[in-house]
Image (cartoon, helix red, strand yellow):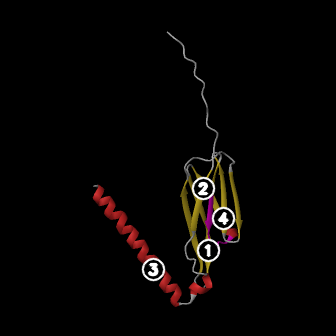
């Protein structure tokens, strides 16, 4: 069973690499790569401290008017439209699984240029005081 899972994962990685290579060749054959700066895919970086979790996404040409951010439990979904030169507007969707469910009202978003910055506040952990009683 484990071998089948490893085989599927390897095949999916190979398929993704082949599709990305094909798209990049098609884009460069139409001269789009230079106009687009060679950035066809979004980049994601994250870091955390004890109170917050930070996510930075590099999303070129995301249309701000169409961007919507949904928080569904531990899943953060970013939906919108990307404007790709010579190809027009395409839908964009990114789902990020978070290490915790953020505090209510604790999601802060900033979009400047091509960068989407998210700050998620961790909920306070409940501390229970136990009293030990001898029977």
Disc 1 target residue: 82
For this rendering, which residue is in front, 51 or 23? 51
Is residue 60 magenta-colored? yes
| Spatial CA span between label 3 and label 2 | 29 Å
Q: Is residue 94 left or right of residue 114?
A: left
| Spatial CA span between label 2 and label 1 | 26 Å
Q: Residue 47: give its label.
A: 2
In the rendered structure, which segment of residues is drawn in magenta?
55-63
Q: Quadrant of the N terminus?
A: bottom left
Q: Considering the numbered disc 1 on the image, is that residue within a helix, a strand or a loop?
A: strand
| Spatial CA span between label 3 and label 1 | 20 Å
Q: Is any atom of residue 84 visible in this view?
A: yes
For this rendering, which residue is in front, 40 or 46? 46
Contact? badges 2 and 4 (CB < 8 Å): no
Between circles 3 and 2, the one closer to the viewer is 2
In terms of sequence position, does the residue under pointer 2 or pointer 4 come before the other?
A: 2
In terms of sequence position, does the residue under pointer 3 or pointer 1 come before the other?
A: 3
């Amino acid at each position: 069973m484990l071998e089948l899972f490893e085989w599927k994962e390897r095949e999916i990685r190979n398929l993704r690499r082949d599709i990305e290579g094909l798209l990049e060749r098609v884009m460069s054959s139409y001269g789009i790569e230079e106009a687009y700066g060679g950035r066809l895919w979004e980049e994601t970086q994250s870091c955390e401290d004890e109170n917050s979790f930070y996510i930075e996404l590099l999303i070129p040409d995301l249309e701000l008017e169409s961007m919507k951010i949904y928080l569904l439990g531990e899943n953060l979904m970013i939906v919108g439209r990307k404007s790709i030169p010579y190809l027009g507007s395409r839908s964009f969707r990114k789902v990020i699984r978070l290490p915790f469910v953020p505090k209510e009202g604790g999601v802060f978003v900033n979009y400047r240029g091509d960068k989407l910055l998210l700050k998620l506040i961790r909920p306070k952990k409940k501390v229970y005081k136990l009293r030990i009683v001898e029977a």
